[in-house]
Image (tube, rainbow, N blue to C red):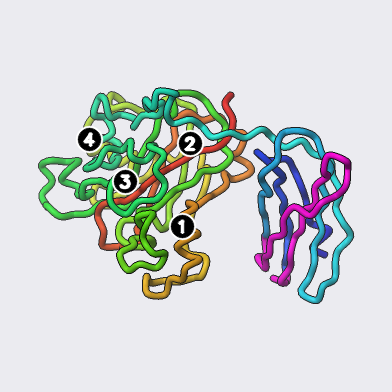
Amino acid sequence: VIRNSLKASVAFGGVYVSWKNEFNANLSVSLYASDPIGDMILYDIIYSNNPIGSHTFRGFDDSERNFRLRIKDRWGYYSAPLDTVLSPLLEEEIRSRDEFQKPIWSKYGLNDGSYIWRGDAIDSEPWTAMIDGILISRGVPLYNTSDNYLKSYIPNYESNNVACMPWYFTFDLGSEVSLSRHKMWMRGRNPNEAILASSHRYYQQGNPKYYEIWGTNKRPKQKSDFSSVEESLSYWTAWPEIGGTDAWKNDWVKLAECAALPPSGAVTSAELVADDILYADKGFEFDVFPEASGQEVRYVRMVVKEFWEKSFTKINIVEFKLYGAYR
């Protein structure tokens, strides 16, 4: 039954596979790929019991080759194979800096101050720490924001300590691209620290827990499109204190919905195991929704809905990378 719903299509750097598993059966999906002499070699196996399953097998160039998919159940029975011939799309990292290490990306609205009108994060450490190539860090360098209090956006706001969530940040990538995935590294540990050292900061503090990625190819609305900062913030945020509507989402495309969770299922730092730390060391990777992978974008907006510690009012991100293709 599951085999009848199994589908394969090209993806950036590999093959996108989807299936329906209405019985929530425990199964594995194996991908075989032809080698240079034409033999079918087992490439990878993934496991799932989700009712709607999908996975992107990556690591291939853009040359045409034979692929084979097989489903196996918990008793060792295999389905009939699905054979296909595909040419994966060429994938590359979307460069955030040039050969002289000068940023290509920019924090949108920083130069004219309009990022305040969009409710975007106010830096305490330079935002460029997110694109400096350093992946593991507990101290500096990492991107750290000021407390996201509403008074920072509306100076005459009557309360001094109203924290704003979600948290927003908008990139201008400098050119049009199609995105395939992204990776995000949390504030974590120093590279020479023991894996389970109590001083690590993974899955704690202002590290993102649940967040979204959005994109658009159109120039975002400007300050001149609004009569006041309050009206602009109502469009650009979901902050209830100013009647936020997140109406900007009607003009952008949702690229990914992300949950940066430890693979062990731990919910507190005391429950973490070594594999959780090593998993975070590699960065949290999320594919762009298949229906949005061909969307041309120049502007990317990150929306953090929840930090690992809900009481935190500033965010910690060590590195952020995008992958896909230039147009």
**Measured from the top left, where is residue 292 in percent x and y?**
59, 39
* Sequence order check, earlier mark of 4 and 2: 2
Q: Mark 4 highlights which residue? A: 229
For marks 2 and 1, give the one nearer the viewer: 1
Residue drawn at 54 percent across, 49 percent down: 286
In the visual, does 37 lie left or right of 124?
right
The residue lying toward the viewer, choosing from 27 and 215, is 27
Mark 4 lies on a secondary structure that is helix
* Range of magenta residues: 23-52
Does the magenta run of residues contain 225? no
* Sequence order check, earlier mark of 3 and 4: 3
* Sequence order check, earlier mark of 4 and 1: 4
In the visual, does 120 lie left or right of 135?
left
Q: Label 1: few (<14), some or many (≥20) within 10 Å?
A: many
The answer, for residue 117, to whether it is visible in the render is: yes
**Measured from the top left, where is residue 80 in percent x and y?**
89, 60
Labels 4 and 1 touching (C-beta < 8 A): no
For marks 3 and 4, give the one nearer the viewer: 3
Residue drawn at 80 percent across, 47 percent down: 33
The residue type indicated by label 4 comes to: Val
The residue lying toward the viewer, choosing from 23 and 235, is 23
Determine the CA span between mark 3 and mark 2: 24 Å
| The C terminus: image quadrant | top right
Q: Mark 3 highlights which residue? A: 142
Q: Mark 1 highlights which residue? A: 280
Magenta stretch secondary structure, dominant: strand
Q: Mark 2 highlights which residue? A: 215
